[in-house]
Amino acid sequence: SNAFDQGGKVIVTCAITGAIHTPSMTPYLPITPDEIAKEAIDATNAGASILHLHARNPETGQPDQSPEGFSQFLPRIKHSTDAVINITTGGSPYMSVEERVRPAATYQPELASLNMGSMNFGLYPLLSKYKSFKHDWEREHLEGSRDLVFRNSFKDIEYVLETCYGNGTRFEFECYDTSHLYNLAHFADRGLVKAPFFVQSVFGLLGGIGPHPDDVMHMKRTADRLFGDDYRWSVLGAGSNQFRIATQAADMGGNVRVGLEDSIWIGKGELAISNAAQVLKMRSIVEGLGFSVATPNEAREILSLKG
Ligand SMILES: C[C@H](N)CC(=O)CC(=O)O
Ligand SMILES: [Zn+2]
C-alpha cells in the first residue's frame, strides 16, 4: 500500500550519518554523539518520523558498530523525540554480520535495517572527487571497495532475523535490486518475516540497480506483483539522485528516505548544511504533491510497529 491508502500520509525516514561518506567530503557530516543526537532531534522536528542510525568514532569518524558507540546518543534522542528508532544492521560493508547485528540485538529497537542480498559496493569512483583526506582510513575505505563484497548470504539474513525477531523488532528491508525483492519473498514464503513488509528500495548505488525512472518503475512493479498489499514501499536515491528519486516515488504515493548517509547534497553542487535541511526540502515536495508527512505514531500504525 502507499500514501493513497495511508490517508495521504508519507513516511519520511532520515538517515543521519551512515557509514559511506567520510569527514573530508563535507564539514556537515555528524560524527560525534552530540552532533548525531542534535541532527536526529532537528530532523524529527523538521518532519522525519523514522531515524535510521549509525555510530561513528568521534575522533576519526570511522564507522563504529559497538553498542557503546550507540549508547552515547540513543538515550538523548529517545528523551527528546518520539521518533521511531531504526538501528542499522548494515554497519559498514567491511564488517561481519556478527558485529553488524550487535547494536540492534542490544537495544531491541522498533526497527532495524536488513540488507536483502550480497552485492558489490562501489565507493571508489568517489576518490576522483577529493584531492586529500584528513584521515588515512578514508582513502582505504574508498579504494578498498574495488574488491569489496557487501556480504548478506541467506544464512546471514536468517541470523539477523533469528537474533532480532524475538525482540519485537521489525525491519527496514534494504533492497538494492529486484533479486533482493525475490529474496524477501523467499523469506516470506518460509514464514520468517511478517507482513506488512517495510521495503526500502535503494537506487543509484554502484553495484545495485540504477537511478533511472524506469528502474524505479521496475522495482515498484516487481514489489507490487510479489507483495500486493502486504508491503509499504519506500525509496532512497544515493548521492545527487536523492531528491529526483524521492519525488518520483512520492508522486506515486511512496514513502521516502533522505539524510546525509545517502547524500551530502541539497542541490546541484550545493552541500546540505544539515539533515533537517534535506527533510524540510522533502517535506515541501510532499506537501506540494498534496500529501502530508506522517507523524511517528502514524508511521507506527502504517508499519504495525511494536511502539
Ligand atoms: C545505502 C544505504 N547506506 C543502505 C543502508 O542504510 C544499509 C544499512 O544501514 O543497513
Ligand atoms: Zn544505513
Image (spheres, rainbow, N blue to C red):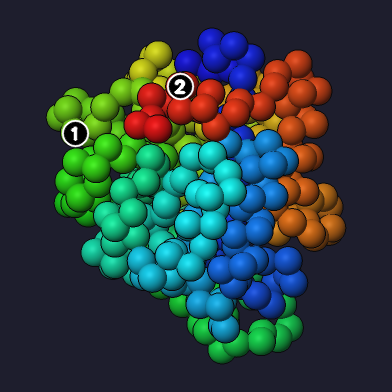
User: Whole-percent x and y of residue 263?
Assistant: 66, 55
Q: Secondary structure at mark 1?
A: loop
The residue located at (69%, 42%) in the rendering is 45
Number of labelled discs?
A: 2
- What's the CA distance linking mark 1 and mark 2? 21 Å
The residue located at (39%, 41%) in the rendering is 111
Dividing the image into 4 quarters, which one contains the C terminus? top left
User: Whole-percent x and y of residue 48?
Assistant: 63, 39
The residue located at (57%, 83%) in the rendering is 59
Tell me if residue 115 comes above or below residue 178 in the rendering.
below
Tell me if residue 110 comes above or below residue 55 in the rendering.
above
**Residue 236, picture quadrant:** top right
Q: Residues within 10 Å of mark 2 (few under 14, many from 20)?
A: some
| CB within 8 Å, label 1 to label 2 | no
* Three-letter amino acid code at the position of disc 2: Glu
* Three-letter amino acid code at the position of disc 1: Leu
Q: Mark 1 highlights which residue?
A: 192
Q: Which mark is residue 301?
A: 2
**Which mark is nearer the camera, 1 or 2?**
2
Looking at the picture, tell me which residue is in the foreground, 21 or 139: 21
